[in-house]
Amino acid sequence: MSFVRLPESVVSCRNLVGGEWVSPAGASAQEVRSPYSNALIGRVPLTTASGVAQAVEAAKAAAQGWRATPLRERTQFLQRFRTLLEAHLERLAHLAASESGKTVAEGRAGLLKGMEVCDFALSLQNLDGGAHLEVSRGVTCEYRREPLGVVAGITPFNFPAMVPLWLFPIAVTVGNAFILKPSEKVPLTATALGELMVEAGYPPGVFSVVHGAKPAVDALLEHPDVKALAFVGSSPVARHVYVEGSRHGKRVLALGGAKNHLIVVPDADPELTPQAVVDSFTGCAGQRCMAASVMLAVGNVQPLVDDILRRASRLEVGLGMGALIDRGAVDRLETAIAKAQADGARVLLDGRGKRPAGEAYANGHWLGPTVLDGVRPEMEAARRELFGPVLSIVRVPTLSAALAVENASPYGNAASIFTTNGAVAQTVVEGARAGMVGVNVGVPVPREPFSFGGTGESKYGHGDVTGPSSLDFWSQLKKVTRKWSARTDGSWMS
């Protein structure tokens, strides 16, 4: 492992509109600082409604010609883009890490996961050819998959490459013109992805990048020519996006936050389980919707807890675990830890004040792995999404009690069971409320073509943004029924 390489010079981001990089008129600029050192690494324009309208107009102009392009030809552009991603993998991994706080390995992993989605989209030329059937004598029915037109994606700071790559490869391949609005905290990676889309040869306007904050989001939600919109972020904002987008007649899928549960029982594998728990709550510094934040300790699992503490305490911030996105995140988490203590929790491992050695990272945003024990289900540490490397241990007497805690959460993103007993595993698979369940897997993210998505307050809308169900979100089916001549020997259809 190695420390991230920060950009050699400050990057001034612009919008990609109609195939050209433009500075949006009337937009103020915001600084982009690396979580590792607080060093200035970029500037991002905060696009206004007029700048969003400019991008939508260019996308709308491109959409007609793009929808008429055969699917097989569309995939050729995507194949070139995927090849470019692979060629620039290390540069993009460092870039994503430098602005989001990830380790370089995590930045690389996000890109590789995104490339899996590209592979799924590339397969559509062979898998999604429509259907044609003679349904009655002299009568045939078929369906044709057609794009929606202009669609958009609003993506979060914690996965600058992966989440955009969940969205636009599929949306563009089925024939839409796509507008990406990345988090204003991580605009550099989105800009780099846009550069590679241009280099891949996509027609101008098929892929756009619009930088900005809430006014840009609201403009996309309100614009009548944006037909569908996907969002990934916190639950309160996901709810707002879903309600407002739906109110304006759009198709919306908004993925929100999580409070994920790892259920650990006494017969859990003593080698696999502790490392899986540590990887789950410390990966991406806990800044991911799939991070475990509550461990439901069933019965006597103290030897496993002790091993979790040993492994977590050996993690070196900056190398084994990255930084938090900004100072506000550090303050919020330190306040949450103090609140848990005041509520009666014990701090078994305290990450406050931990930072890498050396002056270069003294001003970064750091919090080491933190483990709280004696957390009760009603405490904030057990209920509220903390979004950081903090594990709350809730002690429960039985598996039924553990499932009751999991089921009571308003979220429903992920849950995992650690056991060597198949019946115990099946009980959790069937009884958990979460939309993604793992068995001895700390981060149960499905691999393609299996779709990603939770339930409850972790998802607003229907379907998923990846996998087969994403096709129905990003397109619509036109059904065609044909008859060419009168028949006297058929059913009611003929």
Image: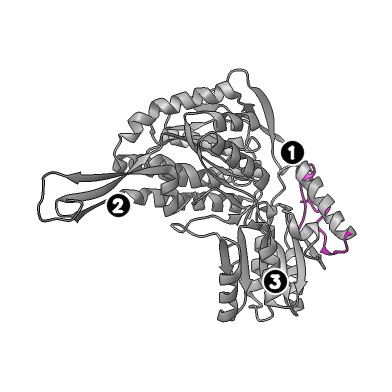
Q: Which residue is mark 2?
A: 126
Give the number of the disc on residue 38: 1
Q: Rate crowding at label 1 as few (under 14), some (14 to 19) or many (20 or more) other CA atoms within 10 Å.
A: some
Q: Are marks 3 and 2 in contact (CB under 8 Å)?
A: no
Q: Earlier in the sequence, mark 2 or mark 1?
A: 1
Give the magenta part as a residue range: 343-369
Q: How many marks?
A: 3
Q: CA distance from mark 2 to mark 1?
A: 47 Å
Give the number of the disc on residue 473: none
337 vs 116, left or right, is right
Of residue 32 and residue 88, the one placed in the foreground of this image is 32
Which-is-in-front pick, marks 3 and 1?
Answer: 3
Q: Residue 206, located in which quarter of the rendered image?
A: top left
Give the number of the disc on residue 402: 3
- Disc 2, SS: helix
| Residue 274 can be seen in this image | no
Say what amino acid the circle numbered 1 marks. Asn
